[in-house]
Structure formats: C-alpha cells, structure tokens
Image (tube, rainbow, N blue to C red):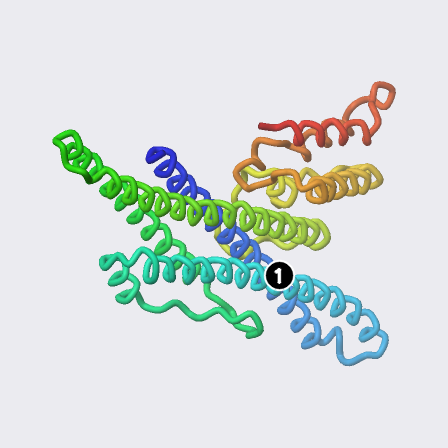
C-alpha cells in the first residue's frame, strides 16, 4: 500500500509537469500569432501612409478587404486568449477548492501540529470566487499544486511512522499487556488517514487528466489557426523562439517543412483532408497529448507521397485518411 501511494504521487507530479509543458506551448504559439498580426498591422499602416494609397476611394475599397482579414485574425487570437484564461481559471478553481479541503482536514480532523504550522506559515493563495471575474496567474497554479503535493507526501510519511509505532506497540501485547483494543483503534485511525490521503491523490490525478485534455485541445486549435495563417499569408517568423518540430501539427504549419504542391487542385484537396482528419481526431476525443503527436502520424508527408502516385495506381484519398485515422486510434 505504501509503495502504491508513493508511485501515485510521483505519477501525479509527472503528469502535472506535462500540463505545465502544454500550457507553455500554448503561450508560445499565441506569441507567434501575435507577432504575425503585428507584422500585418505594420504592413497595413505602411500602405495607408504610402503615396500609392492617397485616400483614393477605389483604393479604400481594396484596402478594406485587407483590414477585414487582419481583424478576423485578431478576433481568432482574442478567442484563443479567452479560452486560455477560462481554462486557467478552472484549473485554479479546482486546485484552490482541494487546497481548502486538505487544510480543513489537517486542521480539524488530523490536528497535526507540524502540518497546521505549515499551513499557517504559508502565504495565503488568492481566494477563488465562482461569481467573480478574475484572472489567475499560472504560476499561482504551480505554487498551490506543489504545496498540496508536499502536504500529501508528508501525510503519507506520517502514516508510515504511525504504522511503525503500532508494530512496536504490538510487541507489548506479546509481553502480556492488555492494549489490544488500543492498537486496534489506532490502526483503524491510521487506515482512515491513509485512505483520506489517497483520496487527495486521486483528486490530483483526475485534475491532471482533465487539464491535460483541455490544454491539448487548445494546443491543437492554436496550431490549426497558425497553420492556416502560414498557408494563407506567407510571412516568415520574426521571433527566434524554437518551435517543437516533432509533432504532426508542427509539420503542418512549419514554413520550412511545407512543400507546396504545384497542382492547385491537389493542394486544396490535401488541405481539406488534413483539416477533416484533425477535426475527427478532436471530435472522437482521441488521446492527442503533445508527447504522443510525434508518434501517431506524419500526415503531411504521407499525403504528399500519396499525390505523387501515378493516377492509375492511386487509392482514394478518403481510404488513405481512414487508414491514418485508424493508426491514431490504435496507437499505444
């Protein structure tokens, strides 16, 4: 039982690191998108200031389409930022409520002085109120998660110490002392304490599963927006941040890796197939965490090779996509 608890809390901490990594990746993509939009803003401003524009009504009609295109991309970024903040708030909400749950248990039930002092000495985390619109920094989420994990580890060690003490007390029974009932009561209390601690661990484990899914889907959505922007408007990256080239979605959007197809119809068909494939992955809620993306599929390369096949020997594009999707579903 002790080993299982140790293993569980270790997995919880490892899974939370994956959540942190996903959240950082989302931030990186958003910065990338913002840089591109800033470039479009500069281009738009330069056009307005140029002699070519000169407030001509006909040219105003033409530049208005560019302005709409720019505003549409800004709207998409704002939507992504709103969803990111919404997820962040939910992640903090669940951690804060668990923090209060653990604090109440330690203070009112466990009544362990060391843990009580630890809670009292800890700087209070921002109060979460369901009806209050407030943004919570992800660093605060990391801090409260670390604090809860440390308390859980301490309770587990405390349970182990109590069990060792009970074993020593059991020796007195063999020496004729009538303390059997006392040992049974203490053993029961220790069992309840350990199971309550395991409940806290299970909450953390469930949080990680949900939050990983939220950020994974957001990550995919960000990458699709970036991919469409890269294909629609050929602007080179101005930031030097290194992108993760291992994932399939990066392969779709990396300017350096996209091999443009000479046949325009085939290019459009390929883009539609890729979008439908990723959409089906998301809708069917297939596990698409960032670490698995580099293993599940190389869609771009596979489909590009497909269109190079001689027409007489070429299978249907739907059959190829169905095969790729099936590989994703059964990927370990």
Identify whether 183 is placed above or below 66.
Answer: above
Q: Quadrant of residue 246?
A: top right
Q: Is residue 239 toward the left or the right of residue 58 in the image?
A: left
Residue 327 screen position, x and y as percent: 67, 27
Q: Is residue 175 toward the left or the right of residue 136 in the image?
A: left
Q: In which quarter of the image is residue 80?
A: bottom right
Q: What residue sits 75% from the left and 73% below the top?
A: 52
Q: Is residue 298 toward the left or the right of residue 123 in the image?
A: right
Q: Can you see residue 17? A: no
Q: Name the residue under label 1.
A: 83
Between 204 and 191, which is closer to the camera in this rendering?
191
In the picture, the quarter occupied by the N terminus is top left
Residue found at the very far left of the displayed protein: 175
Between 10 and 69, which is closer to the camera in this rendering?
10
In the picture, the quarter occupied by the C terminus is top right
Q: Is residue 271 toward the left or the right of residue 243 in the image?
A: right
Q: What residue sits 26% from the left and 41% below the top?
A: 181
Residue found at the very far top of the displayed protein: 313
Residue 138 screen position, x and y as percent: 46, 60
Q: What residue sits 24% from the left and 37% below the top?
A: 180
Residue 190 screen position, x and y as percent: 31, 44
Secondary structure beneath dot 1 equals: helix
Identify whether 213 is placed above or below 140.
Answer: above
Residue 266 screen position, x and y as percent: 82, 37
Q: What residue sits 44% from the left and 47% below the top?
A: 199
Q: Can you see residue 280? A: yes
């Amino acid at each position: 039982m002790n080993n299982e608890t140790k293993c569980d809390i270790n997995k919880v901490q490892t899974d939370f690191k994956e959540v942190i990594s996903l959240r950082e990746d989302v931030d990186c993509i958003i910065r990338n998108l913002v840089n591109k939009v800033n470039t479009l803003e500069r281009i738009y401003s330069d056009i307005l200031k140029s002699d070519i524009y000169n407030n001509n009504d006909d040219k105003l009609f033409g530049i208005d389409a560019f302005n709409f295109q720019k505003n549409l991309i800004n709207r998409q970024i704002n939507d992504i930022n709103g969803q990111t903040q919404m997820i962040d708030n939910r992640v903090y909400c669940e951690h804060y409520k668990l923090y209060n749950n653990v604090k109440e248990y330690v203070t009112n039930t466990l009544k362990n002085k060391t843990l009580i002092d630890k809670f009292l000495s800890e700087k209070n985390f921002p109060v979460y109120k369901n009806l209050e619109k407030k943004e919570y920094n992800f660093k605060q989420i990391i801090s409260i998660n670390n604090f809860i994990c440390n308390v859980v580890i301490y309770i587990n060690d405390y349970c182990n110490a109590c069990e060792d003490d009970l074993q020593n007390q059991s020796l007195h029974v063999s020496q004729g002392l009538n303390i059997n009932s006392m040992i049974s009561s203490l053993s029961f209390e220790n069992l309840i304490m350990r199971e309550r601690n395991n409940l806290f661990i299970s909450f953390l484990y469930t949080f990680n599963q949900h939050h990983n899914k939220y950020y994974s889907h957001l990550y995919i959505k960000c990458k699709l927006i970036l991919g469409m922007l890269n294909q629609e408007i050929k602007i080179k990256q101005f930031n030097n941040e290194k992108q993760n080239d291992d994932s399939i979605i990066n392969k779709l959007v990396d300017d350096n890796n996209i091999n443009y197809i000479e046949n325009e119809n085939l290019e459009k068909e390929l883009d539609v197939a890729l979008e439908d494939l990723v959409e089906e992955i998301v809708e069917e809620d297939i596990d698409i965490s960032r670490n698995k993306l580099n293993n599940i599929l190389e869609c771009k390369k596979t489909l590009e090779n497909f269109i190079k096949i001689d027409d007489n020997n070429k299978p249907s594009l739907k059959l190829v996509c169905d095969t790729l999707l099936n590989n994703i579903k059964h990927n370990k």
